[in-house]
Amino acid sequence: MLKPEDLLQLKTKNLTENQVEEQLNYFIKGFPFLKIKSSASVEKGILCLTEDGQNRFIESWDNYLKSKKRITKFVPASGAASRMFKELTAFLQASYDTPVTDFEKDFFDGIPDFAFYEALNVVCRKNEGADIPSLLAKGRYKTVAANLLKPEGLGYGSLPKGLLLFHRYREGARTAMEEHLVEGALYAANSEHTVDIHFTVSPKHLPLFEALVREKKAVYEKRYGVTYDLSFSTQPANTDTIAVDGANAPFRDAKGRIVFRPGGHGALIQNLNRLDSDVVFIKNIDNVTPDGMKDIVVRFKKVLAGVLVTLQKKIFGYVRLIESGNYTHEQIEEMIYFLQDVLCIKNPETKFLEDVELVLYIKKKLMRPLRVCGMVKNAGEPGGGPFLAYNSDNTISPQILESSQIDMTNPEAKKAFEQGSHFNPVDLVCALKDVNDKKYNLPDYVDRDTGFISKKSKDGRDLKALELPGLWNGSMSDWNTVFVEVPIETFNPVKTVNDLLRPQHQ
């Protein structure tokens, strides 16, 4: 199936023939659905804290910040904003010239309230010799939209979300990236007042991010009394996946070259694995708020981090006890209850294990990366959710699953999915080192059977694309996972440009 020239192409991407054959095989056999026990809830699997409990964990995090540990804020920021402007792009291509749909009307009615309004006004004056109100008064709606989206204007149709102006302030508008700089200063500054933030970006946009850092870094360092350690990485070429046609043969472009596509956010487990950090916050680039709403965001970031370091301390204590060999039967029982009641790991086989086997089982389950995941009450937002799912070793553990991973033809599985009380806002805090301060090798904990296949098109032709196990789904499948309920106010994604008109972004 692969030609000699294909092998040369693989070499440029640092992919082996075996890797590509494995990918092709997934198109043929597909991915198995995950068997779920139930959706997670505050009754089972989701920790719901009182205000006193929140305060105790905040204190734990504040104390941890005084240590010499390395704390990193990890922000996936490579996605283009094209989906944000899908409706406006369609408007530019429509046969009509004035707003017709509710979305179009809301956009133009609310245009003065966007943070990018002043910048858009400048380019309209430059390119059209008129400001936005004058253009709209003449019915030139498409001209305004074109100046927002096209490269000769603001170019927002092809920029990543991180570089778009999201929020307006008296001193000027801020991009989404700048809001992450502010957040980092408020909950992730270490004892030396250093804030370590890592952005994953696309290669073509890296110079633009670096330019923004040069322009803005000193401003926020002075304002918040911190020093930023900012770094960037791009998705490795060898995480790209092959595309296929309807017959599951490699999809080729007009020149006969195999088409590869980015493997999705699951590829970022490699970027995360390269960080030499003790604790890592993970949050999407578009989930930010203006300063007036940051208090609750910061509070619950600290709560999640406090839960993480408190649990890690407990886990390390148990591991040291096991390694000492000086433990009692009562202490082994305590560890089992910790696995079952706190980490929500159930194994019906433990009652059949001999003492030595039981201790080895406990140690194996404790010696894994740890993550604490904020979960929001279901409010109809898109995205995966928290479940208690079966693993390959027949244990049951907390997992974040997408609908594509669940067999919706199975009535029980479908019912469990539909009855889910919470959804995943991508609000994670992770511990990446073991009791001996050694980094876990994160790819070792990926469930490679949790990817999925999606349908795309290129040059007017249909293709099938392979998505790697998601970063917070299958890529963290074999981690210890704890779910904590967080308020809906901490989740403010910007999926379309009109989301910026919501009260929480004004």
Image (spheres, rainbow, N blue to C red):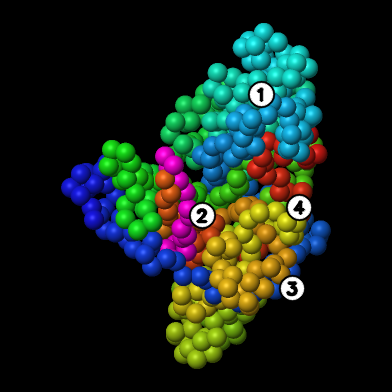
| Magenta stretch contains residue 162 | no
Residue 303 visible in the current orientation: no
Residue 429 visible in the current orientation: yes
Which residue position holds label 3?
43
- Of the numbered discs 2 and 3, the one sitting upstream in the chain is 3
- Of the numbered discs 4 and 3, the one sitting upstream in the chain is 3
Judge the density around disc 1: few (<14), some (14-19), many (≥20) Cα neighbours within 10 Å: many
Which residue position holds label 1?
142
Per the rendered image, the range of residues in magenta is 445-460
Q: Nearer the viewer, residue 105 or 402?
A: 105
Q: CA distance from mark 1 to mark 4?
A: 35 Å
Judged by depth in the image, the label closer to the viewer, 2 or 1, is: 1
Q: CA distance from mark 3 to mark 1?
A: 52 Å
Q: CA distance from mark 4 to mark 3?
A: 19 Å
Q: Position of residue 400 (x, y in %)?
A: 59, 63
- Of the numbered discs 2 and 1, the one sitting upstream in the chain is 1
Q: Residue furthest left?
A: 4
- Image position of 146 (left or right of 14): right
- Amino acid under disc 1: Lys
Q: Position of residue 86 (x, y in %)?
A: 61, 37
Q: Residue at x 37, y 53 (%)?
A: 245
- Of the numbered discs 4 and 2, the one sitting upstream in the chain is 2
Which residue position holds label 4?
488
Q: Are marks 4 and 2 in contact (CB under 8 Å)?
A: no
- Amino acid under disc 3: Glu
Q: The C terminus appears in which quarter of the rendering?
A: top right
- Of the numbered discs 1 and 4, the one sitting upstream in the chain is 1
| Magenta stretch contains residue 448 | yes
In the rendered structure, find residue 471 and report the number of the disc placed on it.
Answer: 2
Judge the density around disc 2: few (<14), some (14-19), many (≥20) Cα neighbours within 10 Å: some
Q: The N terminus appears in which quarter of the rendering?
A: bottom left
